[in-house]
Image (tube, rainbow, N blue to C red):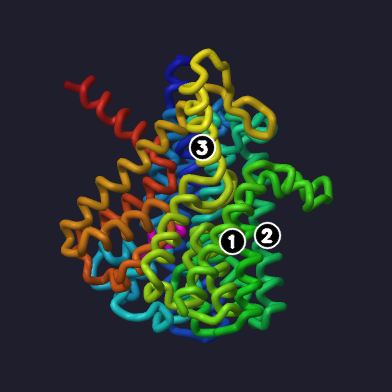
Amino acid sequence: MRMEKENGLELFWLLMGQMSILMAGALIVPFLVTLIWGDTEAWLFVLPAAFAYGLGRVMIKMGSSEHRGRQLTIREGVYFMSFVWFLMCIIGLMPYAISGIFPSFPSAFFEAMSSLTTTGLSCLPYDRMELPRGLILWHSVMSWLGGLTFVVVMVTVLPQVSGCFGLTLSARQSIFFSPVWNKMAQSARQGTTVYAVLTVAAAGVFYLAGLNPFESLLRAMVTISSSGGSSVYAFIYYNNPALELAAMAVMLMSSLSLLLVWKAWKIKSILWLLKDTEIRNFLRVVLITGAVLAGHLYLTGTYDWVESLRYGFFQTMSFISTNGFVAAPFWLWPSFDRYVLFLLVFVGGCIGSATGGLKIMRLLVLFRLTWAEMRRTLHPRMVLSIKVDKLPVPDKIVGRILAFFYLYMTAFFVFAMILSLSGISIIQALGLAAGCLTSTGASSALFGLENLHILPDWAKIFCSLLMVMGRVEIFSFLVLLDMGRRSFQKRW
């Protein structure tokens, strides 16, 4: 009997039910705001909210409260990480589908999944700014919830699935994670608190830069979540250096580890963050890359030296934070600069943030591993260990990072090849695949692919799956496929 309970999915259903009720509560936000505005589209959110709440109650009943004290199983973690995005997407696309704005289900599915995975892509045949205000607000709310979901998964479920792979690589990891339900709830509250406080702080920064309170909050939600990208929030329309500086500050905040920010907040020392190796290297990459772009833009006569610095550093921060905001027509820049921006989307921010990409820490470990192997080639008897913050990185973690890097790059090239079957060029397919996998939709615009409504329906669904794969860090998705394969073999 005990084995049956341990092999059940009670905590999976509890988690899914709570996320469904969270989506129901989120749908109330645009409903109330549109009522206050007096807009007619308020009714678009009533039925989805009722459906999400009812579904959530059913799922919670399928789970049992007596299991709240036990440990989350890897099976439950994999199922939750994989299926929660589809649950939220089905609920999130309902206002789009009811409005009749999107011509097909795949288009609405793509739009909702893009918001939830903070990719920022759109398949609308026109500018998203032409949508009803309620749907624009719903897009921002979904993006913020998607970033929050990733943060919560990262501090609760992901370490159980991938062996403490989701967070920092040092001994500090043990402070923040426990697979027991009650401890997971505590970690989720910590991550949510930091995420919400940073959002409010970001809104304050945008307000001081000249935006009204409502616009400040919307822009803060999509920036902290690393969604960005959308034409609704393009900085190129404002041409405001002060607003761009504010955005760079917020994008920097969104790229840092939320758990380290939490600790710095508790000890009341922002400078403590600079003691972290990953954060220091992240800042180095931003400064060096921004200077290189600014220098090349100036030398090629693209801009004067002031605008070169302004746009070079802004777009560097925009792409490395996987926001993809636009302050200048970078698709018209020289090939070298566009290629540098393309590489930045793979770098990403720090582990523990809502950004996409490979993350600085993993690339740092790969670099130090490569350097150690080069030294071993010259000195075969030398014993070397990979260290981060003066602490050795376990061989298990190094092996996982190597496997992750291989799977990540393999998925990128294979999926780009598949997307080229949709009628776009291979270069555009590379940009689109990178955008979906790293949650940086603007990378597709680097190579001239701006209107995604031309994609066939199968390509939109495929891109949506790729967005989820990038968000769940590939490993859990592959574990899910392996579970399905084994289950199929047992039945036959």
Where's residue 460, x and y in %?
26, 60
* Residue type for callout 3: Phe
Give the quarter of the image for residue 59. top left
The residue at which mark 3 appears reads as: 367
Report, in whole angstroms, how far the alpha carbon at label 2 lies from the one at label 1. Answer: 7 Å
Extent of the magenta region: 111-119
Where's residue 278, x and y in %?
62, 44
Residue furthest to the right in view is 268
Report, in whole angstroms, how far the alpha carbon at label 3 lies from the one at label 2. Answer: 31 Å
* Residue type for callout 1: Ile
Single out the mark in the foreground, 3 or 1: 3
Q: Is residue 345 visible?
A: yes
Q: Is residue 121 left or right of residue 239?
A: left
**Residue 216, labelled with which disc?**
none
Which quadrant of the figure contains the N terminus?
top left
The residue at which mark 2 appears reads as: 198
Q: Is residue 396 left or right of residue 489?
A: right
Where's residue 337, x and y in %?
43, 66
Q: Does 139 appear in magenta? A: no
SS category of the residue bearing label 3: helix
The residue at which mark 1 appears reads as: 224
Q: In percent of the image, x 36 and y 65: which residue is there?
A: 111
